[in-house]
Amino acid sequence: PPSDDTLLALPKAELHLHIEGTLEPDLAFELAGRNGVELPYASVEELAAQYDFSDLQSFLDLYYATMAVLRTEDDFAELTRRYLRTAAAQGVRHAELFFDPQAHVARGVPIEAVIDGIGGALAEAERDLGVSGGLILCFLRDQPVESADAVLTAALTRPERLLGVGLDSAEVGYPPELFAGVFARAKDAGLHAVAHAGEEGPPSYIVQALDLLGVERVDHGIRAAEDPELMARLAADGIPLTVCPLSNVRLRTVPDLSAHPLLRLDAAGVRVTVNSDDPAYFGGYVGDNYLAIRDALGVTAEQAERFARTSIDASFAPTARKAELQ
Ligand code: ES4
Ligand code: ZN
């Protein structure tokens, strides 16, 4: 089997990473103190002890509550700096960061502080760490579409590091079709499109994301493994999946890692990438996900190299940058 060092050193792109999901308990308490925000937990240990989830919603409740400590441009910059440093140490050379502006604007944080904070740290990382990247604005699918429309309009005033739009938060009951209009407007503005689909939701949500949102990649997408016809379509059309193995275990989307459909999708010819989702909450960064699938699924060096190569290829990096990274 490939060594830890081999897996960590593979040049990778991280394509499924919620920057708010990189908020570690120690930074959460530091920012809470600095900003005068009260967390409902007495200590770092007590907060960390809450990280035992029964499903996606139980995680989202804690995720939205804890991000209340993020208030200023510098908070977002510090969060992003710490993530990029850790990711670079695990082989990440390009990172496309999801962010949830509706969750911040609703708390009175200006979207400019969010975008400039994350964007500033990305610019620094490009210079200091050799990590390139950009932002993917995610719409909260459990909020009204009017709210998604409003943040898109606001974000388009700062288009510099904005690569695309995505769709996240509670999935079941909020099908992609609800967001066809706002995705069409984003694409008309020249943005790429991705969406979470088939994490907890049925394979039909993956089909909707492709047909009605025109997504170029599917985030998670693991429930495609239940539908041979859909796997064949994803393979034929070269649609990459951004798979997050440790996330799926922690949110009980799969019973345990040894039952994860990653290799079945790969064997069906689907383009698979490996990512960390919300690493502060799910027990590891992207390299840790590679080590875990080696240990639980017997992923070989050849398979791991293919996943890493696919991640760079499936990224929205400029062609010249991709060539440099392969
Ligand atoms: C998320 Cl794991 C996951 N699924 C859907 N939405 C999310 N937002 C942050 N993490
Ligand atoms: Zn996600």
Image: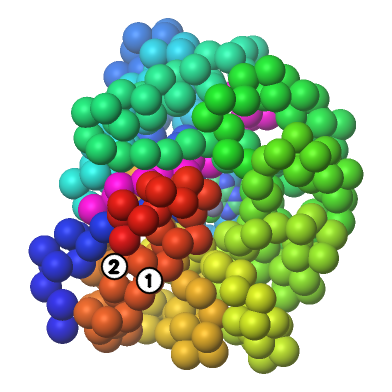
- Picture quarter containing residue 117? top left
**Which range of residues does the magenta coloring cover?**
91-104
* Viewer-side residue, 13 vs 254: 13
- Residue of label 1: 307
* Viewer-side residue, 93 vs 18: 93
Please tell me whether mark 1 sits on a helix, a strand or a loop: helix
Tell me the crowding category of disc 1: few under 14, some 14 to 19, or many 20 or more residues within 10 angstroms, Cα based.
many
State if disc 2 and disc 1 touch (CB < 8 Å): yes
- Residue drawn 37% across and 25% down? 123
- Residue of label 2: 290
Residue 93 visible (yes or no): yes
Apparent side of residue 299 relative to residue 51 in the rendered image (left or right)? left
- Picture quarter containing residue 270? bottom right
- Whether residue 97 appears in magenta in the rendering, the answer is yes
Residue 284 screen position, x and y as percent: 30, 54
Residue 25 screen position, x and y as percent: 32, 34
Please tell me whether mark 2 sits on a helix, a strand or a loop: helix
- Picture quarter containing residue 151? top right
Q: CA distance from mark 1 to mark 2?
A: 9 Å
